[in-house]
Image (cartoon, grey):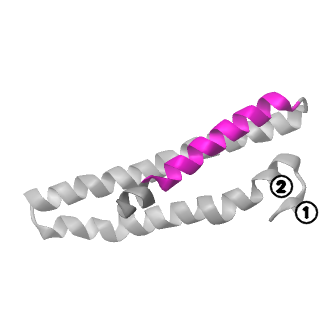
């Protein structure tokens, strides 16, 4: 259960972020801010696409390892660290800099 929560955590964060950014986009009137919010929305979509690619790749290669042989698990040496890096970027970099990027004010970085 804990592994499943760990695997879906980036999806939960992105869904919350996209709803937050969508509501913030409708609240603001400034054109520059709207453009930056839209960029962050696209960034979230791309981040989830990359994470999904590695996640699905991991599942496919685990299944292939049972069909072919144990060498199929060697791909996990690439996909699992890449999933960790993607998750780390989302939690440690993106979330701390989001508001500073929207307002274009480096002093807002947490």
Within-10-Å neighbours for mark 1: few <14, some 14–19, many 20+: few
Residue at 19% of width from left, 64% of height from top? 72
Residue 58 magenta: no
Give the mark nearest the N terminus, 1 or 2: 2
Residue 27 magenta: yes
The residue lying furthest to the front in this view is 1
Taking the image as shown, residue 12 lies to the left or right of residue 102, namely left
Q: Which residue is mark 2?
A: 100
Boundaries of the magenta span: 8-28
Q: Is residue 64 above or below residue 41?
A: below
**The C terminus lies in which quarter of the figure?**
bottom right
Q: Main secondary structure of the magenta part?
A: helix
Label 1 close to label 2 by CB (< 8 Å):
yes
Element type at mark 1: helix
Residue at 37% of width from left, 54% of height from top? 55
Element type at mark 2: helix
Disc sitting over residue 107 in the figure: 1
Within-10-Å neighbours for mark 2: few <14, some 14–19, many 20+: some
Residue at 52% of width from left, 66% of height from top? 85
């Amino acid at each position: 259960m804990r592994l499943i929560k760990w695997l879906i955590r980036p999806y939960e964060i992105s869904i919350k972020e996209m709803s937050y950014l969508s509501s913030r986009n409708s609240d603001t009137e400034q054109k520059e801010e709207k453009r930056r919010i839209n960029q962050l929305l696209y960034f979230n979509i791309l981040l989830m696409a990359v994470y999904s690619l590695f996640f699905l790749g991991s599942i496919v290669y685990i299944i292939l390892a049972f069909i072919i042989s144990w060498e199929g698990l060697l791909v996990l040496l690439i996909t699992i660290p890449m999933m960790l890096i993607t998750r780390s970027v989302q939690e440690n970099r993106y979330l701390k800099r989001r508001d500073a990027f929207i307002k274009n004010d480096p002093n807002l970085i947490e």
